[in-house]
Image (cartoon, helix red, strand yellow):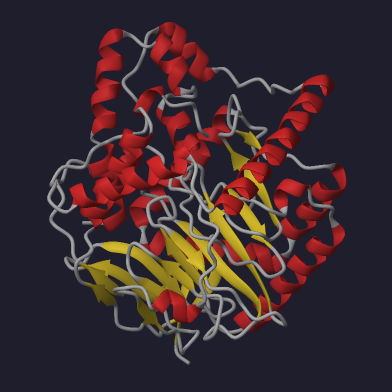
């Protein structure tokens, strides 16, 4: 197999040169997709006043060219001296007291119990709650409006929309029986393909094996995941969550879920030491470098944005620690055992950004473990060791379950939208920025945010 060598940080990096033809999807537009999702979010929540939160071708109409690089526009116009001083000073490390931590744990336990009771009552009665019914109506109205609209409503400028919680598990035949669903096979694991819209805009990327010896890397990563899963005790909320019923554990830099500033995800001492060993493993490091390489070569503008945000965060607060040196993603989640997700959207990620999902395990990828991109009508085979890069905050997605005797884990790399918002505001939340900004700067800030949906679509599609 022919492969091409690349130099990165003075080291040789090999990648197979075995591209497959791009697949073009007709009738799906990048701009229309963003419009539908942003309008759904607009009706569901009230924009800025919401709580702080941390190749294939598809049809696309031309996008207004108003951005060169969103990374350059992250820094707002300068404020007067009080804001400048705040931006230059290091962010203090705010820790909760023992009493506050205990109270938060008790509240979380009550939330889990209440949620399970509500779900049980709804399942027994066979009806949806008020919020679920309203969200379903909102989504249908937004999708209908997106067919004729040519303007992207900038509802929630950074994050994706929220959709009703769906507990239905679909088999491969059931999924393919839905209208306009299309099976994408991946017979050669060394092949890579780009998913594009009708005008050539990028939507997602299917990355094959990185080069010779990648099968050994996959075996080592599988061993690392197995060791971490058997060496740690996972809390109940990590075993059963909105993405599915499988163990999951996250690490890295995050902002959202009640955090007052970007911070490292924390774990008990034993869990932290196990994750540290996994993070330092050479196979995990190589996988992270490959993710960065794909982002840099296939989505260069997004890569520049992600890298700039990470650097700004670390400059502001040196205690923040990215998972992997030289990787543009801020956080990583390990999904263990027999992981397959329910239909969902990762709404807290950057709406125009990407997450990288690598499948690992012993399973027949032609029968199960497929990645379903519902908004694109794609059911994609994902062989072990291959990675899919797609906008998880924009496209509803799920996995096909595997057989009972099989095992499937996954490694997901992503960055929370709250990190981009924090850097854009110069090191503060939206609420703090609005309270401290000069009226002229606030006007410019609001005007810029109104154009972010179009800019994000431009950044994702690369056109």
In-image side of 179 versus 67 (left or right): right
The C terminus is located in which quarter?
bottom left
Please identify the residue farthest to the bottom as the structure is shown: 1
Res 310 seen here: yes
Image vertical order of residue 395 relative to residue 348, above or below: below
Image vertical order of residue 217 relative to residue 376, above or below: below
Between residues 87 and 263, which one lies in front from this camera angle? Answer: 263
Where, by quadrant of the figure, is residue 100 drawn? Answer: top right
Between residues 316 and 20, which one lies in front from this camera angle? Answer: 20
Q: In the rendering, at what x and y percent does residue 332 appear?
A: 61, 53
Q: In the rendering, at what x and y percent does residue 16 appear?
A: 46, 82
Where, by quadrant of the figure, is residue 410 drawn? Answer: bottom right
In-image side of 225 versus 318 (left or right): right
Please identify the residue farthest to the front as the structure is shown: 125
Where, by quadrant of the figure, is residue 228 drawn? Answer: bottom right
Image vertical order of residue 195 relative to residue 182, above or below: above
Q: Residue at x 33, y 70 (%)?
A: 377
Q: Residue at x 48, y 23 (%)?
A: 429
Image vertical order of residue 207 relative to residue 43, above or below: below
Q: Residue at x 42, y 7 (%)?
A: 81
In-image side of 226 versus 10 (left or right): right
Q: Residue at x 29, y 30 (%)?
A: 449
Between residues 254 and 126, which one lies in front from this camera angle? Answer: 126
Between residues 322 and 242, which one lies in front from this camera angle? Answer: 242
Q: In the rendering, at what x and y percent does residue 61 appear?
A: 13, 57
Q: In the rendering, at what x and y percent does residue 112 appear?
A: 70, 40
Res 157 seen here: no
């Amino acid at each position: 197999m022919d492969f091409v060598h690349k130099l990165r940080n003075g080291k040789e990096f090999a990648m197979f040169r075995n591209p497959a033809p791009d697949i073009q999807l007709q009738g799906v537009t990048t701009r229309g997709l963003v419009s539908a999702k942003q309008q759904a979010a607009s009706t569901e929540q009230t924009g800025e006043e919401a709580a702080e939160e941390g190749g294939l071708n598809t049809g696309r109409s031309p996008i207004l060219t108003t951005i060169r690089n969103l990374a350059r526009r992250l820094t707002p116009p300068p404020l007067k001296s009080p804001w400048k001083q705040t931006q230059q000073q290091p962010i203090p490390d705010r820790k909760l007291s023992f009493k506050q931590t205990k109270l938060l744990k008790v509240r979380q336990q009550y939330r889990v119990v209440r949620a399970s009771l509500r779900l049980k009552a709804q399942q027994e009665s066979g009806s949806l709650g008020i919020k679920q019914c309203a969200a379903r109506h909102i989504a249908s109205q937004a999708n209908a409006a997106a067919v004729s609209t040519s303007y992207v409503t900038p509802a929630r400028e950074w994050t994706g929309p929220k959709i009703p919680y769906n507990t239905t598990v679909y088999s491969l035949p059931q999924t393919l029986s839905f209208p306009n669903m299309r099976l994408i096979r991946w017979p050669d694991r060394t092949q890579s393909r780009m998913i594009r819209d009708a005008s050539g805009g990028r939507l997602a990327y299917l990355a094959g094996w990185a080069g010779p010896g990648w099968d050994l890397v996959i075996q080592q990563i599988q061993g690392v995941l197995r060791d971490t899963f058997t060496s740690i005790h996972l809390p109940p909320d990590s075993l059963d969550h909105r993405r599915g019923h499988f163990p999951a554990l996250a690490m890295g830099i995050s902002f959202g879920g009640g955090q007052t500033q970007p911070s490292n995800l924390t774990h008990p001492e034993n869990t932290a030491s196990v994750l540290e060993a996994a993070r330092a493993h050479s196979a995990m490091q190589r996988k992270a470098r490959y993710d960065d390489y794909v982002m840099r070569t296939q989505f260069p503008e997004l890569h520049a944005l992600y890298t700039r945000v990470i650097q700004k965060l670390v400059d502001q607060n040196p205690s923040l620690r990215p998972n992997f040196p030289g990787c543009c993603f801020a956080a990583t989640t390990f999904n263990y055992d027999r992981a397959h997700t329910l239909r969902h959207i990762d709404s807290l990620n950057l709406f125009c950004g990407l997450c990288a999902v690598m499948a690992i395990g012993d399973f027949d990828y032609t029968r199960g473990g497929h990645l379903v991109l519902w908004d694109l009508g794609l059911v994609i085979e994902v062989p072990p060791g291959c990675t899919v890069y797609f906008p998880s905050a924009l496209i509803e997605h799920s996995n096909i379950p595997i057989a009972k005797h099989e095992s499937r884990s996954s490694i997901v790399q992503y960055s929370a939208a709250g990190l981009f918002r924090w850097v854009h505001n110069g090191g503060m939340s939206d609420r703090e920025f609005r309270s401290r900004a000069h009226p002229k700067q606030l006007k410019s800030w609001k005007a810029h945010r109104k154009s972010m949906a179009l800019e994000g679509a431009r950044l994702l599609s690369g056109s």
